[in-house]
Image: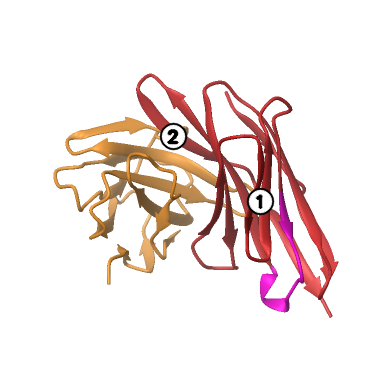
Chain colours: A orange, B red
C-alpha cells in the first residue's frame, strides 16, 4: 500500500545538537511539506517542495533546513539555531494539482532535554 | 499575510447536527480544505472547496462563500468518534508556488 512514512515516532535531543527527521513517500506525489504543531497553535508551515531539487521557506523556516534530492524523500534537519524545537512535526505530500488534499505521515514528536 | 479564524472549542450531543465556521482573509485564494485530527494523530482529509456552494460527502458537508471569505463544515448524525479537532486550511497561489495555511483548529466534543 502506498503511504508516507515518518521516522522516528519519538525523538529526544540534547540542547545544541542537530537532528534529522525522515520523511519518505511512495505515492508518486510531486509536492512535499513539513509542518510543526504546537498546542493551541494549529499547523505552521516550515518548508515545502513542489519538485525535486527545489524547495521554499514556509512561515517559520528559521532554525530548520531541508533537502529534496529524490522525489520520494524530504528530510528535515532541526538545527541548534532553532530556539524552541520541542513540538510535533508532520510531513505531508500531495499531487501538484492538490485538490485531493494532503496525505500526512504519522508524525514525529521531538523533545529537547 | 493570511488570517484564518475558527472557534476554539465546541460541544454537541450525539445524534445532533453541528456547524463549525471558518473565516479567512487572504490574497491569492485557491481553495479551502477541512481536515479531521484525533488527539495525537495526523490530520486526515475531509473536503475541498474552491467554488462557491455546498459539497456533500456522507454525514459531512462543507460550504464555501468566496465573496464573504467564509466556510463551514456541517456534521450530521453526530457519533462519539467524531470527537476530534477540525482544521480549516486555505491554499494560496503566490509567485508560481502554492502553499496551504492552517487555522488553529476547533476541538469538538461529542457528549452522550
Give the chain letter at badge 2: B
Residue at x 29% of width, y 54% of height = A19
Q: Quadrant of the N terminus of chain A?
A: bottom left
List the residue tagged with mark 2.
B99
Give the chain letter at badge 1: B
Front residue (pair B105, B58): B58
User: Magenta segment, which residues?
Assistant: B73-83
Front residue (pair A99, A49): A99
Is residue B54 shown above or below A50?
Answer: below
Q: Residue A71, how many percent across, how many down?
A: 18, 47
Relative side of A66 to A93, left or right = left
Residue at x 66% of width, y 29% of height = B66
Q: Is residue A101 rendered magenta in the image?
A: no
List the residue tagged with mark 1.
B105
Q: Secondary structure at mark 1?
A: loop
Q: Quadrant of the C terminus of chain A?
A: bottom left
Residue at x 27% of width, y 49% of height = A29
Q: Secondary structure at mark 2?
A: strand
The residue lying furthest to the bottom in this view is: B112
Q: Is residue B74 rendered magenta in the image?
A: yes
Q: Residue A25, how many percent across, how many down?
A: 26, 58
Amino acid at each position: 500500500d502506498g503511504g508516507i512514512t515518518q521516522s522516528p515516532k519519538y525523538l529526544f535531543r540534547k540542547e545544541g545538537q542537530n537532528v534529522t527527521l525522515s520523511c519518505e513517500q511512495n505515492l508518486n506525489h510531486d509536492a512535499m511539506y513539513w509542518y510543526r504543531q504546537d498546542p493551541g497553535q494549529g499547523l505552521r508551515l516550515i518548508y515545502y517542495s513542489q519538485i525535486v531539487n527545489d524547495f521554499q521557506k514556509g512561515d517559520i523556516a528559521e532554525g530548520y533546513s531541508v533537502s529534496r534530492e529524490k522525489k520520494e524523500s524530504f528530510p528535515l534537519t532541526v538545527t541548534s539555531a532553532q530556539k524552541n524545537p520541542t513540538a510535533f512535526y508532520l510531513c505531508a505530500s500531495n499531487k501538484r494539482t492538490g485538490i485531493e488534499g494532503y496525505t500526512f505521515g504519522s508524525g514525529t514528536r521531538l523533545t529537547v532535554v | 499575510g493570511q488570517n484564518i479564524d475558527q472557534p476554539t472549542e465546541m460541544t454537541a450531543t450525539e445524534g445532533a447536527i453541528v456547524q463549525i465556521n471558518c473565516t479567512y482573509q487572504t490574497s491569492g485564494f485557491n481553495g479551502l480544505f477541512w481536515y479531521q485530527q484525533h488527539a495525537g494523530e495526523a490530520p486526515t482529509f475531509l473536503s475541498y472547496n474552491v467554488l462557491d456552494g455546498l459539497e456533500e460527502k456522507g454525514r459531512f458537508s462543507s460550504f464555501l462563500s468566496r465573496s464573504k471569505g467564509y466556510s463551514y463544515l456541517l456534521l450530521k448524525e453526530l457519533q462519539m468518534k467524531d470527537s476530534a479537532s477540525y482544521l480549516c486550511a486555505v491554499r494560496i497561489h503566490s509567485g508560481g508556488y502554492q502553499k496551504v495555511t492552517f487555522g488553529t483548529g476547533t476541538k469538538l466534543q461529542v457528549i452522550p
